Image (spheres, rainbow, N blue to C red):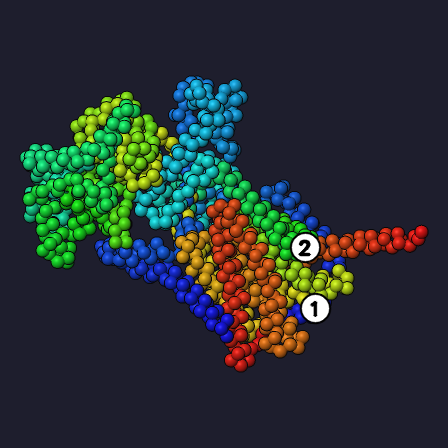
Amino acid sequence: MRIFENTNYDFVGKRTGYYLASAAIIIIGFIILFTTKSIPLGIDFSGGTEIQLQFEKDIDISELRTAMDEAGFAGMEIKTMGTERDVLLRTPMQGEGLLVAERIEDGIKQKISDNKFEVMRTDKVGPKIGEELRRNALFAIIFSLIAILIYMAFRFQFIFAVAAVIALFHDVMVTIACIAIANFIFPGLRLEFNQSMLAAFLTLVGFSSNDTVVTFDRIRENIKLFKNENTVSVMNKSINDTLSRTVITSGIVFLTVLVLFIFGGEVNRSFAFTFGIGIIVGTYSSIWIASAIVTEWKLKEVKSLKKKSAGIRTAGIKKA
Amino acid sequence: MKKNLSRIVVTIALIVLSVYFLYPTFQDYNLSKELSKLTGQDSIDFVDKNSEKLNDARDKRLKLGLDLKGGMYVVMDVDIVKLLEDMSDKKDDMLVSVLAEVKEASKDNDEIILETFKTKLSEKGLNLKTYYGEVRDTEADVEARLNSEIDNALDRAVEIVRNRVDQYGVAEPQIQKIGNSRIIVELPGVSNPEEVRKLLEGTALLEFKLIYDPQAVVRVMESINKIMTGDTSSVSDTTVSLNNNDSLSSGNESITKTDTSNINSAANKDSLKDTKSVTDLKSAGKDSVTKKDNSSKKEADTVNNTDTAVTESDTAADETDTSEAQLSEEEFREKYPFFTMVSLNQESGMADGYVKESDKDKIDRLLKREDIKTVIPSDMQFAWSKKTFESEGEKIYVLYAVKKDAELTGKVVVDARANIDPTSNTPVVTMEMDSEGASDWSRITGANINKRIAIVLDNVVYSAPVVRSKISGGSSQIEGMADVPEAKLLEIVLKAGALPAPVKIIEERSIGPSLGEDSIRSGILSSIAALILVALFMVFYYRLGGAVADVAVIINMLFIFGIMASLKATLTLPGIAGLILTIGMSVDTNVLIFERIREEISLGKPMKTAIELGYKKAFSAIIDSHITGLITGIILYQFGTGPIQGFALTLIFGLLANLFTGIVITHYIIEMFIEKGKKVSFG
């Protein structure tokens, strides 16, 4: 069985529409992100106390909220996790030791006496650490992008390297936008920016750069093979050549992540969702961002070359 | 074919090596499974019987991080501001208020505290020299000195924390300095935050404790032995005589005398060396404590050369000795279970017990037993040595018996410094005490000449030097350290008394193991399901090629886990993310190659040529994508922290393994099929 064999789709002919689509998603996503703060920072990155409880019986959230309001935690975030018995409480409040957690426990015990509970997890984070970790992660990612830029400039041409890095940047932005939108439309997803989401971003950057490199590799090969053909057709040919590989690889990895998303449980969900979006976006960007930018550049190059050569020709006509 | 042979050898060798490194993981899993079936005494017996195997497997298994195994992650802040306040020569209101501002400011930014301090001081028209300098110092000198003091304070805090965590007995703790005022402690498998807080917070306690009278210690050990053998008849006897400790030592005057004279003669023999160091110090106005460290057998031997053996006809030590000669090893084990685990060096005249690392836990449990506690005098306490030495491939700890009540606490220590003694060219540590401490110290050392005083930090003995003379004036010199790092460690420990830098827990997370297990289980189950789907698809789509690719992915994972286990790396959730990326790229490598081969086949090339060309043409894409990934991994590992490093580590190993399996192994297997004339199909 073969799929996408000897295809001849025009991928890079109409590029502008895809630029606009990407830009639109990024803009909409970031507007939602900044107006509704729809990607909550996980306890990894913001200060606060998070406490997860498991009750014996189903618990009424509004009852719990009333109890917490009276215990001095007004407007606290209270969410069920999976079942009606598992509850996640979160407050930006912090205290020495586990003081906040103890106060929460006491507050519940006072008001809800008929439903016993067990504390499954308590997390307390100082905001300073969050900042340090975030800054470290950011620097690490920026440095690795620079390294990718240098290596690819060395192995391909400089424009390929620039295009690849722009594509990676695009992938991260679009994925953030998609998460913001998904959280906005389906608040139940509760995707927060925590360590596993950070891991997912690293993974998607790795996956996307792999995909881009493979596509570029074919372009590099075909540019040498088909020197006389025009840029757009060489680009299209290369992408078509790698299309079946792209679809199979991305498809396989996407399916794996989909299984993890559906059956992997709450903890794995934010990883699976982020990486899943990343696979789609990363595959898309190899073609419509990375390859498209290279096409754009090559076309300009050809144009300016033509202009230059035109200039030379007119200069050559003049005879003394 | 020759090329193929070397490929086979390398491949098989690597697989065997991976299996070898992963075997302890498998063994650990089996042992813990067996252990979980047992309860009560049975499980204790099982641990005792298999302790070596268990420890070995636990040490060498593939380690799971806190996120996968559960436990505690603690970030501690060392109070540098407090340290700066303590170090100042003149503490005026201005300094206090500036430091309060520094403390406030340091809460919201990550600036180096000393820098903030400098800025705040200069705002007030002051500088560091105002508070810390002497007349001749330049500002830069003062700053350098403060910086090194801050560094030392951090080292000290790390040492204190490590000491406490080690005592707590957590397997695979990770303790590291981070930034300029923090320590990260990771304790996998620990679930009681109260206990951890109690363990890690609070000021370190440095004490000077007298080593217990050796004769009495031997008697106590003998009584413990009797309880262990079940010979209760004479236990009460011993208890009585031990409870009446004072009369015992005065009653056995001869022993005490022999003891003293022996050590005196030892001291006399040592006098040459002794006078040397004393003269040196006297020129500097110092007296000396000369350390006779007994924590290594080598040193114990030198002690033997000088100290003639304490001969006591009626002590257990001798009895043990004669018995040892007559009894077979098994009989000895049966009759002297305690002395089988705790061996004494009778000739040294000291009652320090030498205990193998594998027996340490057993001794700890034994000493906590109620019936055993009854024979230990109320003023006696056992403490382990910090230093260990190797004997027959195992670490040996020293079990000291010390007086429970400290003679002096570390608060009186003003300063400590590790140096090289210029005359003997050996490392020494000098210690200064304040005036109050000095007068106590003079009295204590005067009354205990030729006895040993243990330097104890949080119940661990760092050193037990012999008092050579009465030390008045507050300056002491401790010698006998094996090397400079050991002297440096003692300096750190002594300073823990001098400049206690309080540590405070600023972040702690407990990961409930049950929660972890749940998500790990569903994560693993769904990943396995997904992998099986992928494997089936590959076989369906690429036929033989797909099957080979599946084998390659399995070998690849074996390699990754093997490398991780051999390097004692820890697998974490982000690490698994790296693994997923690696598997994705591993599949991609094969897909790239097979697609190329298909292209060549559709161009009408014969199978063998198509395969060669397929591998050749796919190579540039594979190598470029892998090197890009490797560069990313290395940089993330270098600059990232915690989770990012975990990701980077599996990615690096994974990509390396991938290059080998994807390019070498699959190629070889497919070639082998071709050579054997089998029909090869790529779908």
The location of residue B225, given as percent across then percent down, is 14, 48
Residue A258 seen in this snapshot: no
If you read the primary sequence from the N terminus, does the residue marked by circle 1 or circle 2 appear first?
1
Say which residue appears at 77% left-offset and 56% top-offset: A299
B575 up-or-down from B346: above or below: below
From the viewer's perspective, tell me whether residue B253 is left or right of residue B425.
left
Say which residue appears at 42% left-offset and 53% top-offset: B569
Badge 1: few (under 14), some or many (20 or more) residues near its Cα, within 10 Å? some
Q: Nearer the viewer, residue B106 or B150?
A: B150
Q: Nearer the viewer, mark 1 or mark 2?
A: 2
From the viewer's perspective, tell me whether residue B620 is left or right of residue B262.
right
Q: Which mark is residue B146?
A: none
B610 up-or-down from B195: above or below: below
Say which residue appears at 15% left-offset and 55% top-offset: B333
Mark 2, residue position: A157
Say which element carries label 1: loop
**Quarter-wise, where is residue A236 in the image?**
bottom right
Tag 1: amino acid: Thr
- Where the N terminus of chain A falls, by quadrant? bottom right
Mark 1, residue position: A7
